Image (spheres, rainbow, N blue to C red):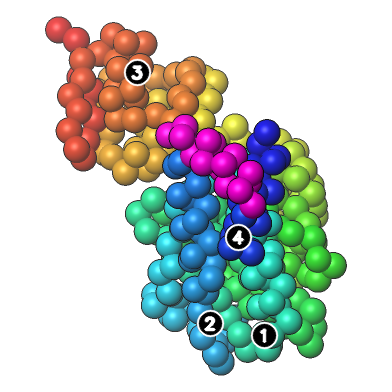
Amino acid sequence: MQDVISEILAKKLTEGQLTAQEQQELDMWLQVPANAGEYAEIMRLWEAAGNVKYEMNVDVDAEWEQFKQLTKHRIGRRRFTWVAAMAASVALLIGVFTFRNSTQSDIFKYTSANAPEMVVLPDSSVVWLNKNSQIAYKYNDLTNTRTVALIGEAMFNVRHTGDDFVVKTPQHVFTKVLGTSFNLKACADSKKIELAVVEGKVAFGSRKANTVVTKGQSASFDCRNNTVTPSDTLDNNAIAWHTGVFNYNNKPLSKISAELGTYLDTKITLPSNARNVNYTGYFDHPTRESVAEIIATAMNWDYKVTDSEIAFSERK
């Protein structure tokens, strides 16, 4: 049934007209509130993709200051995987047109707000931007290269086109791929760039120091001494900001509170005797209230939750 609805939605977006039977099936599907929400998200994505704007003559490699003025065509984060697939398929129509009518100086720029967002690039690659992150995309038809400049953190699902796909950061670290899925964290003032590869294979590092990282592996680049440190494992929570799922196994509670605090945009204050305490637990799309209740119950603490802080205290 879902495949049928996907075809009907694609037809409605691209052709604008449905048969009586198709319209009836769509109307019945939209009677479910959750489906109506998915439909609204698809329509917003379609409208945003149709309004993509480009700025000319921008040097992605050098003009980092221009990121501060990135165009804010904001697109809501996908909550359903089939919606993301549908959105990418629809955007492909726009992406092909843009690809064929672009020049080497065309550039697509985007910044996320204070929440993670999904962006479909002109080549139909899908990027989930963490909050307050910035990207700029340029296709060079002379070298057949897709270049993305990133400040912040992003999860990439790169569409295979046969052209190189290169992500650059302000620290002059690059990640070169063909078709893959990976997470890259590269904040503007960070001394360390962090990579986690979910699918495929990438080359990661600088021109002088780089390594190949494959599925299920991770790596970090130390900008102070220009070295790459690879790892054969992935941190369970490398992409938790995107999935909303945090899984901890005997990890210092101080680090856990820092990670969850960043995710919730909330200060988490622990009792003074919690510096050397480790914690094992699982959080699925945590809220301030759920984090406070779960940790307080496990540690036998009291807690107080406000709009900006979760404060734990020893139980008297």
Question: At 57% across and 86% down in the image, what residue appears?
Answer: 59
Picture layout, residue 147 above or below residue 216? below
Q: Nearer the viewer, residue 133 or 37?
A: 37
Which span of residues is magenta-colored?
19-34
Q: CA distance from mark 2 to mark 4?
A: 30 Å
User: Looking at the picture, which amino acid does disc 3 mark?
Assistant: Ile
| Lower position in the chain sequence, tag 1 or tag 3 | 1
User: Looking at the picture, which amino acid does disc 1 mark?
Assistant: Ser
Element at badge 2?
A: loop
Q: Is residue 51 visible?
A: yes
Mark identifier at residue 54: 2
Q: Nearer the viewer, residue 254 or 312?
A: 312
> Is 145 on the left-hand or right-hand side of 297?
right
Element at badge 1?
A: loop
Does the residue at mark 2 contact the one at mark 4 (Cβ under 8 Å)? no
Per the image, the residue denoted by label 4 is: 17
Q: Nearer the viewer, mark 1 or mark 4?
A: 4
Q: CA distance from mark 1 to mark 2?
A: 9 Å
Q: Nearer the viewer, mark 3 or mark 2?
A: 2
Q: Nearer the viewer, mark 1 or mark 3?
A: 1
User: Looking at the picture, which amino acid does disc 2 mark?
Assistant: Tyr
Per the image, the residue denoted by label 1 is: 102
Q: Is residue 203 visible?
A: no
Does the residue at mark 3 contact the one at mark 2 (Cβ under 8 Å)? no
Per the image, the residue denoted by label 3 is: 295
Q: Is residue 232 magenta?
A: no
| Lower position in the chain sequence, tag 2 or tag 4 | 4
Q: Nearer the viewer, residue 111 or 302?
A: 111
